[in-house]
Image (cartoon, rainbow, N blue to C red):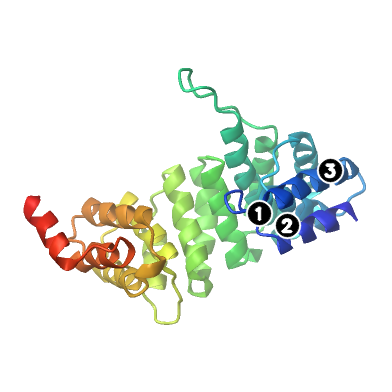
Amino acid sequence: MASRILATFTSLVVLNEESCSESLTDLKQDLFYSYGGLLLSQSLSPAEISSSLYAYAKANYVQDMGVFDHLVKLLASSMHICSPRQLSQTLWSCGKMIKWERQERLLPEEQNIKKEDPPYLEDALSIMKELSSRAEDLSPADVAQTIWAMGRLEIQDDKLMSIFANRVVNICSSMNSVEVSNVLWGIVRVGYNDRELIRSLSDRLTTNDIRISPRVAASVLFSMGKLTWKDEHLFHKLSMIMIDQIQDVNAQSIANTLWAFQAIRIRAPSELLNIWAITRLGLKPASLKQLSEQE
């Protein structure tokens, strides 16, 4: 019951701390505080465990990590009877949680940043190894979440990654743009530069049957820049997606995209920055011309 309540709450409420109302934030704190203790049980099913972990990660609830640690260990102890979806979702939860947990542990600026490995990191690695033994059963979502989690958890294991990379190559034609973006982000984080894998992902992104949002386009471009993957057709397609939907593009995406073009030594389309400045900043063409002349 506790896992269902927490999972339902996080699925119905967008828990973005920047836009979340104070009342919803208080409700989140109360719910997780009240029901978290009920999850300290040994009799939870894999479905209950994975959904609870997802709820904790989605809610960014790091005030009581003891419950989260317990749940990961409990699931790892029964991972042989868990589905690939439950295991990969658990890894995603660990990846989300380590981000928020490490932010909570930052020391004052005058001191060195303290970066500790959480207790669940070892269990996460065990779960990854279990998934690698079932690679042929992984769906596009499963393998994308797993590789993303490897990047977030900073697990650098080329042998393990190669197993998941081969799976991606085999099912790449079925992946959506978000899954492709997550794979690219993950391999960038761990420094895994497999050209066959990258080529497969690049080819998938240039097909006509894939839908790509401006946010995903910017993320892919940045990753491709990091990987020094020079595909002019891909870069043109993704930049045009951003130009066509410029109202949904933020300043960070523009900066990352311009950097990516520079990284692979391709000239970025001038209209990308110009249209963004006109649409989002309200600058007039004359103002842009003056800025260009000053440079």
Q: Nearer the viewer, mark 1 or mark 3?
A: 1
Residue farthest to the bottom, as pictured? 208
Residue farthest to the left, as pictured? 293
Q: Amino acid at mark 1?
A: Leu
Q: Which residue is mark 1?
A: 15
- For the question of whether residue 133 can be seen, the reply is no
Residue at coordinates 28% horizontally, 54% vertically from top-left? 260
Label 1, label 3: how many angstroms apart (C-alpha)? 18 Å
Residue farthest to the top, as pictured? 111
Where residue 263 appears, x then y in whole percent? Answer: 24, 51
Q: Amino acid at mark 3?
A: Gly
Q: Which residue is mark 2?
A: 10
Q: Which residue is mark 3?
A: 36
Query: What is the crowding at mark 3: few (fewer than 14 residues within 10 Å), some, or many (at least 20)?
Result: many
Where residue 71 appears, x then y in whole percent? Answer: 79, 43
Q: Earlier in the sequence, mark 1 or mark 3?
A: 1
Residue 58 numbered mark, or none? none
| Secondary structure of the residue carrying numbered label 2 | helix
Q: Earlier in the sequence, mark 3 or mark 2?
A: 2
Q: Is residue 156 left or right of residue 4?
A: left
Query: What is the crowding at mark 2: few (fewer than 14 residues within 10 Å), some, or many (at least 20)?
Result: some
Residue at coordinates 50% horizontally, 40% vertically from top-left? 156
